[in-house]
Amino acid sequence: MQSSTYDVVAVGNAIIDLIQAVPESFLLEEAIAKDAMTLIDEARADHLTARLQDAVVAAGGSAANTMTGVASLGGSAGYIGKVADDPLGERFTAEFRSAGVAFNTPPRQGPPGTARSIIAVTPDGHRSMNTYLGASTLLAPEDIDADLIAAGATLFLEGYLFDRDEAKAAFVRAAEIAKAAGRKVSLTLSDKFCVDRHRESFRHLVAGHVDVLFSNEAEILSLYESADLGGAVMAAKQACPVVIVTRSELGSLIVTSGGVEEVVALPVERVVDTTGAGDQYAAGFLFGLARGRPLPECGALASLAAAEVISHVGPRPEQDLRALALKSGFRV
């Protein structure tokens, strides 16, 4: 197996995030499902965008956010995702490259436009996402850069891509290329409702292709249709070598055939916005894995990255994560 050029290469939905703090009443007025990701059409996206006039605008998308975290930690990252040839697509590309991530997927000419996620953040720090997928779901198998994927030590796949058959085919092709090159494959389940929609496909992918699975408690319970976390963890352990279950302020679990390792959540002065918490957790963990760190240390790095991102508005690190990790005593 050849040495890798990149620590992590990701495939995901390329999305521009529009994030704004709102009162709880806003969710009721707009019939927004709290703390979930709801798919919306362009008309609904235009309506919500018009209501959030003071939104913070930033390049986002779950796996894309993770790659910016890997880069902030001093790692090398590549990304494959589809934007349109429009101002939002240009902004995504510029921000992403400035963050130090390799991104060369050709933009799509013509409609639909670049995807956007309108994110309402309530006073408790929880985020409710309303996502217009636009051009992002038109990622196709021919967009998968086989050389880029083969050059990454780990492939990171975003579960949201399962919402369109063509993107799903690209997703599976990427996993097959990584496996053929002897690389590790990691997957984030992305959202409970995403798991509900594609449970059997996810189970098949996890059992056949995935080395590291990222989930939160609700997602893993949905994946294995269990009301008991212990039962879901047992089922996951039989399907995948490393399973991560994040549990907000309760920390996280790292599940392997050797047992369950509990990782504490780092305390923060105030939870401002949970957008990107799982994404940055994955960044810290995958970076640690690329550096050959023991799994508990990978989990501790993951918690550090997650704690940084929930302390401010936006899904990407504001502090230099490498400097923060060094200050906290990590070897990076």
Image (tube, helix red, strand yellow):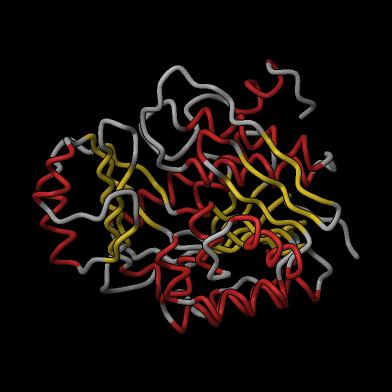
* Position above or below: 164 against 75: below
Q: Quadrant of residue 130?
A: bottom left
Write the residue at 33% across / 49% down: 35
Write the residue at 46% across / 66% down: 160
Q: Quadrant of residue 136?
A: bottom left
In the displayed structure image, the side of residue 158 where residue 289 appears, left or right: right
Q: Quadrant of residue 214?
A: bottom right
From the top left corner, tell me how far across and down residue 325 is, in percent.
68, 24
Along the line of sight, the residue nearer the viewer: 98 or 201: 201
From the top left corner, tell me how far across and down residue 326 is, in percent.
71, 20
Along the line of sight, the residue nearer the viewer: 10 or 204: 204
Along the line of sight, the residue nearer the viewer: 253 or 281: 253
Which quadrant of the figure contains the N terminus? bottom right
Write the residue at 71% across / 68% down: 210
Write the residue at 12% across / 41% down: 25
* Position above or below: 319 against 130: above
Which quadrant of the figure contains the C terminus? top right
